[in-house]
Image (cartoon, helix red, strand yellow):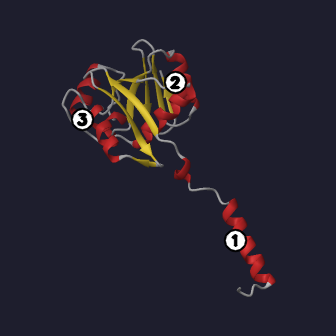
Amino acid sequence: MPDFSRRDFIKLALCAGAFAAAPRLAWADQAPRALSFYNLHTGESLKLAYCENGRYVPSAMEALNHLLRDYRTGDIHPIDPSLFDQLYALQRRMETPGTYHVISGYRSPKTNQMLHAHSDGVANHSMHLEGRAMDIRLPGTDLALLHKAALSMNAGGVGYYPDSDFIHLDTGRVRRWG
């Protein structure tokens, strides 16, 4: 049997205590984060776990980028993963696992320029151009409550378009309009 001094015993006890008190790895306890979408313009639906074990799933991100493409041009652009985290957090606040209806995801420069020319509500330098914005509704959920919940997250830009029945979310600085 090894010869333990009192000092060795105290070191071992402190190390064991520190190990027991240390938080577990953040990803070890994280349940998969899943979302469900329906693209109103293409008729495509998608339900998937986009994040597992604290990591974004590359194949899920590709599928989401495709679903949220500019339907007018077919252009695909990477969508900011933190936008999906916002949507996931919003669903949890609303306590509903419903399917987001997508009005707009990524917009190509050509599409954004065309929309901007025909509407005051489309920004010239929209976050949609960077894959950092989405216009959505959550059927079965009151739009005003969805808007209020999105604002309470303080997670980016939130626009309110009750006449068109959607809210805008983006991963830019915290701001509001509408």
> Which of the numbered marks, if any, corresponds to residue 96?
2
Percent x, y for residue 137?
Answer: 42, 20
Percent x, y for residue 32?
Answer: 47, 41
Q: Residue at x 54, y 30 (%)?
A: 92
- Quadrant for residue 108, please give it: top left
Q: Secondary structure at mark 1?
A: helix
Q: Secondary structure at mark 3?
A: helix
Q: Residue at x 68, y 61 (%)?
A: 20
**On the picture, is 85 further left or further right than 151?**
left
Q: Are marks 3 and 2 in contact (CB under 8 Å)?
A: no
Q: Residues within 10 Å of mark 3 (few under 14, many from 20)?
A: some
Amino acid type, mark 3: Pro
- Quadrant for residue 166, please give it: top left
Amino acid type, mark 1: Cys
Mark 3 / mark 1, whichever is N-terminal: 1
Q: Secondary structure at mark 2?
A: loop
**On the picture, is 112 further left or further right than 3?**
left
Identify which residue, 124 or 66, lies in the foreground: 66
Q: Residues within 10 Å of mark 1 (few under 14, many from 20)?
A: few
